[in-house]
Amino acid sequence: MLIEEQELLFSHDAPLRAWRLFRVRPWNGGLVLSSPMYHDPEPPPWPETESTASCTEAHPAPARGCRCGIYAAVEGTLDSLPGYLLDTAYERDPWAYAEVACAGRVFVDMRGVRAERAEILRIALPDELAGARRLLGERYMVPVVGLEAVPAWVTQNRRGQGPPPAEVGLELDLEKLDLWL
């Protein structure tokens, strides 16, 4: 099935499991995860385990035809999470991957997913951030592990930039998405 933009619905009890990239930033005397691609001198923090998407266009997020929503990647989509590190090489704050449970309205396309809600399930940090494990574990109350926990399809999808080329189509088997059952 060729996916341009498919709207799906996932319940909190059976969410879509996906991976996303974060920046680890200082916040209120501790550490917090934050969106890596938010082009603002003060990117908003993700202070709680769960987050709900919003849109500056004043409609419920995510929405068809808009790029709003909580971004994540699932196996078979083309978004390059490591590529976003190249896109944001100017950033000095360290990065982390997190496995998230996406629920509510979820749009799937060749780039990945845009979700209405996401809950952090676990955080994966590079070895040089071992000191941050305790602080992030206490804040989010989830396991904080090493990069060996990140699936190969995430780490091996290294393109020069994060988003896929516009002319590329995607064949994605929706039956094989990693559902939380």
Image (cartoon, rainbow, N blue to C red):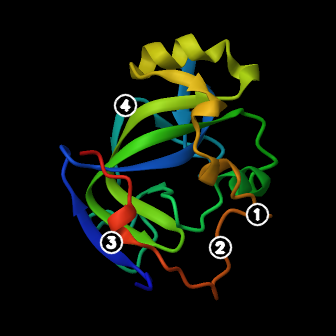
The Cα atoms of the two marked residues, 2 and 3, are separated by 20 Å
Residue that carries the numbered disc 2 in the rendered image = 164
N-term mark: 4 or 3:
4
N-term mark: 1 or 4:
4
Look at the picture and state if 41 lies above or below 171: above
Quadrant housing residue 24 = top right
N-term mark: 2 or 4:
4
N-term mark: 1 or 3:
3
Residue that carries the numbered disc 4 in the rendered image = 49
Q: What's the residue at 26%, 68% (across, down)? A: 8
Per the image, label 1 sits on a secondary structure element best described as: loop
Residue that carries the numbered disc 3 in the rendered image = 63
Position in image of residue 171 (x %, y %): 49, 79
Is the residue under label 3 in contact with that under label 2 (CB below 8 Å)? no
Residue that carries the numbered disc 1 in the rendered image = 159
The answer to whether 164 appears left or right of 53 in the picture is right
The Cα atoms of the two marked residues, 1 and 3, are separated by 27 Å
Task: Inspect the image, locate mark 2, and give the three-letter code of the amino acid beneath it.
Answer: Pro
